[in-house]
Image (tube, rainbow, N blue to C red):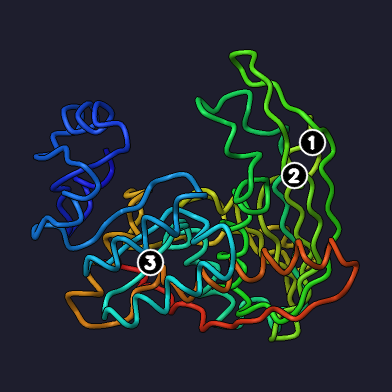
Amino acid sequence: PRLPRLPGVRVVACADLLPERAQEAAARHGVPSAATVDKLLADPDVDIVLNLTIPAAHAEVSLAAVAAGKHVYSEKPLAVSAEDGRKLLAAAREAGVRVGAAPDTFLGAAVQTGQRLIRDGAIGEPVAAAGFMLCPGHESWHPAPDFHYQPGGGPLFDMGPYYLTALICLLGPVARVSCSARASFPERTAADGHTIDVEVDTHVAGLLEFASGAICHLVTSFDVQAEAMPHGIAVYGSTGTLTLADPNGFVGPVTIGRGDDSGWQRQPEASPYDGFDRGSGVAEMADAVRAGRPHRASGELAQHVLDTMATMLEAARTGRRLDVPSTCAPPEPLPSNP
């Protein structure tokens, strides 16, 4: 429903392992063609493949799109393993096509405004940050929750990309991490009553050290029944504190506090992608392809997020403080007006 409202993109085909699902989606959204995956990849009208499969299939489908000479934009995470992500980026470079990946929420007004404010020195030098994503899990509402408790799922791989992408935009790349994690409950019960075996950590508490010197506490959890900490991010600077709403959304209040009588001041928020919501990363990528410039929701950014998450879990497993094996340049802020 979002993509037809976005500038510069047109949905020409959709595909699914179950053909009836593709046909139903095409009829519901007015898509001209409901195809098999192979037919979609061979379609000359397709420039970008939007890969909305479950995490375990992300790398396989994205690699097939690249092999077919298509640009690909994948749901998060880029792949289940960091190694598969690197293989995908190498294949795309060889084929001369682009890889993009969710989340694209950082293109919304909240993170874009925060990025500009930090760049312009509104809170001085960022010295620390904190991010919290605490919830009881997705089984109570998601129509197919099982994959959230399989490799590639869990609170870190499912929700962490929103927070890490926003933090990298605000503070730059992550240099090293420490972490503790646990799978608190061996089983979950879905809304329809079936039992889900838990194969991943469901409470992950990380300490991130950014190359800039800033230090961040990031906690993601599917084990919290009632939260005391609001979803969102705080960045603590030498002259003030910046707060952002939940980075799983495009918009939300951005405030600055300075520890004086002025209290918390809401900042004017702006982004050319205000009101477009999910799909903005695809549209921005299409515009970048046409203009011959780098796209912002890039494979390199998504790979750094994936490397950071994989290193966090390895640090939790080994009890060691570990270097993240990649870096990236944060995407440039968008202009505040279209």
Residue holding disc 3: 100
> Could you say where residue 139 lies in the image, as x and y percent from the top left?
63, 27
Mark 3 vs mark 1: which is more N-terminal? 3
> Could you say where residue 226 lies in the image, as x and y percent from the top left?
79, 31
Residue holding disc 2: 221
Could you say whether the residue bearing mark 3 is in a helix, strand or loop?
Answer: strand
Locate residue 145: give its quadrant.
top right
> Could you say where residue 235 lies in the image, as x and y percent from the top left?
70, 68
User: Disc 3 and disc 1: Cα gap in Å?
Assistant: 32 Å
Residue 44 position (above or below residue 187)? below
Q: Are marks 2 and 1 in contact (CB under 8 Å)?
A: yes
> Could you say where residue 232 lies in the image, as x and y percent from the top left?
66, 52
Locate residue 168: give its quadrant.
bottom right
Q: Nearer the viewer, residue 289 or 38?
A: 38
Residue count near mark 3 (Cα–Cα under 10 Å), binned few <14, some 14–19, many ≥20? many
| Residue located 19% across and 29% down the image | 23
Residue 18 position (above or below residue 229)? above
Residue 329 position (above or below residue 198)? below
Could you say whether the residue bearing mark 2 is in a helix, strand or loop?
Answer: strand
| Residue located 55% across and 74% down the image | 117
Residue count near mark 2 (Cα–Cα under 10 Å), binned few <14, some 14–19, many ≥20? many
Residue holding disc 1: 224
| Residue located 46% across and 60% down the image | 269
Q: Please give left or right for residue 102 compared with residue 4 in the image.
A: right
Q: Nearer the viewer, mark 3 or mark 1?
A: 3
